[in-house]
Image (cartoon, grey):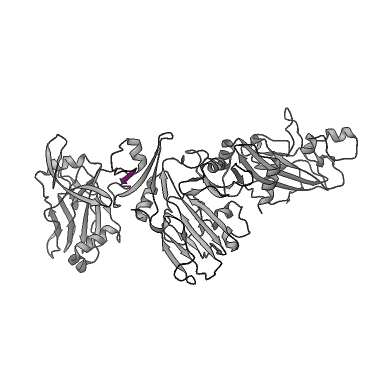
Amino acid sequence: MRAIDGPDGQSIPVGCKLYRDPPLGILTVKPEEPVYPPTEDDPVNITIRYITININLIGNVMSEQKFCSQKIFIYCGQEDTGNLAGNYAWYGRDGSKNYDWTPLPANGEDVESNCEVNAKLCNLCGNPKGFLVTQKDLLPVTRLVLAGSNIGVVIESAECFDLLSSCQEIYDTNERETGYFGKNRYIIDVDKAGPLRPFRVLCEFDKSTDNAVTVVEVGGEWESSVPIVGQDDESEDFDLEVEYSHATKDQINGLAKISDFCWQSVQFRCQHFPLLEDPTQPTTYYTLYDGQPASSFGTGDDVEFDGCACHKLGVCFTAMTCNCDAEGPMSVDRGAITDKTALPITAVHVTGKNDSDSVAQFQIGSVRCSAKSTALPKDCAEAFELVNKDGVDYRQSGEYLISPNPGVVEPFMVRCDFTTFPGKGVTVFRPHFPENNPLPTNSSDTPTPVPYKGVDTDQIEALVAQSAYCYQGVRFDCYSTPFLSGGSYFQSTDLTEKWRFWGGGEPGENGKPGTCACGDDDACAGLDSSEGQRTRPCNCDLMDDKVRKDAGIIDNKDALPISLFNLGEVTDMSQVSLTIGDLYCSQEPLSEYGLILLSSGYP
């Protein structure tokens, strides 16, 4: 029992429950008689009295707290016991009749705990039905009337917490002392008066962006990379539970549900060790909040995808769905999960493999939730400068989560190249468009869409807008088909302007056709006059009986990415194939030689 100051400054004795982990004090109002055993003849009509000097003064103190709750458990009840209506209700401290309360999970921690404490009732009736009352201005419950007889009731203490739900709420309300216990660590309660218990988190406040990140750190062996070759019996499959510091999976999932954005990084480093193999029946995998085997690995918000992030983006180094599934030399699969309903990662399952050459390590990052995604790198150039942040190592080329336009466009996975151009980070997008793709030539003005792997239009537009430079290699192979002189053009994602030039060339003036690379150099093909060669915009515009091509790199950022190509005039003999290369974006200019290397560096 402690004495605290009430709203009018009067000292009021109250009950306090103190915890060490998390370090927390709870105001409690304890009933004089908490347990009411079942009686055969008498219906449930209980008047509840509390250990207190003045219930009204205690009620005033409770109203000043952030939130309060009280749990009531019903033993030996019928299926509909607990459905309140008419005369069947609970009464507030003001005498009001109320019907709203929240059922507790049937096999949840609260029900199990109450069953353990009241073992005699539990042995007689089985697990109780639990209900939660959260209207703090009406608590504690002073009377309970239920239908039926031979029903047991347990009334737990009314409890009040002076906590907030997230680091963002702490930042927004500027209540930095609420729940604080040192070194940027706080106690929060994500469902406030709900069934989830308070837990401790790390808060990262960023005044420059008005953002606060709530971090639930991984714990135990997961604080660093976990080697999964060399466990007790490598020839047998085994499971490893993922531990978190001071939080359960339900508490973390509850945090994710109230947050605007959450993410968790994951990495698998391997040598002669497969990852998913067949995603429909994965061998080594993680399980998410639902406890089911995941067919994906680090694929952002698409947890139902079959394969790793590299497969979703079309940049795996083999034809497999993951880099590690090639079972070759040292390789890495990495990514992040942003589907809030799926978080957190709860365990990993490892296939048995008894091979002395095998190496495998799992690394799982902390769960990070916030109102904005401003803590993520905006692009691969910024990621490269970060080197290592939030448990993600940006020193190797790979698949990473970026956020070029926080609050407007959802974060997404991209391929980052950190090696081709020393000292630079380059963002790579791969078209969902086969090389040397034949175009239909049965009619003129035929549009061909150019989609991209793993990203939406608004996402790729956001990255291009964020970048200072973008480049895309293109090639037009032709036979008996005019190119720019025949009215062919391409469009970017906004579909507003028809671009009538090609890689290495320049747009024309006043809507007129521009040039291809050879036209810009006055060196297009042909054995006619030198004037004809100088004035011809493209090789294909020669229209002779030979296979020609026009190729080059488009570096006009306003025209990128290519999202549609429209083939103009055709002839009865026309044959055309189109190649649209990867899109590369950066904050510094890139050399043409390096772009050629990049174009040939991926399958």
Residue 550 place in picture, x, y as percent: 77, 42
Q: Name the image quarter holding residue 480.
A: top right
**Residue 323 horizontal side relative to residue 133, left or right:** right
As drawn, which residue projects farthest toward the right? Answer: 528
Residue 330 within the segment the image draws in magenta: no
Quadrant showing the C terminus: bottom right
Asked whether 369 or 528 is in front, the reply is: 369
Q: Which residues are magenta?
A: 179-192
Residue 191 within the segment the image draws in magenta: yes
Q: Let me know if residue 445 appears in the view.
A: no
Q: Name the image quarter holding residue 121.
A: bottom left
Q: Let me know if residue 37 appears in the view.
A: yes
Q: What predominant SS class does the magenta segment belong to?
A: loop
Relative to 111, say whether 124 is above or below.
below
Residue 351 place in picture, x, y as percent: 50, 67
Residue 81 place in picture, x, y as percent: 23, 59
Q: Residue at x 29, y 52 (%)?
A: 197
Residue 156 place in picture, x, y as percent: 19, 54
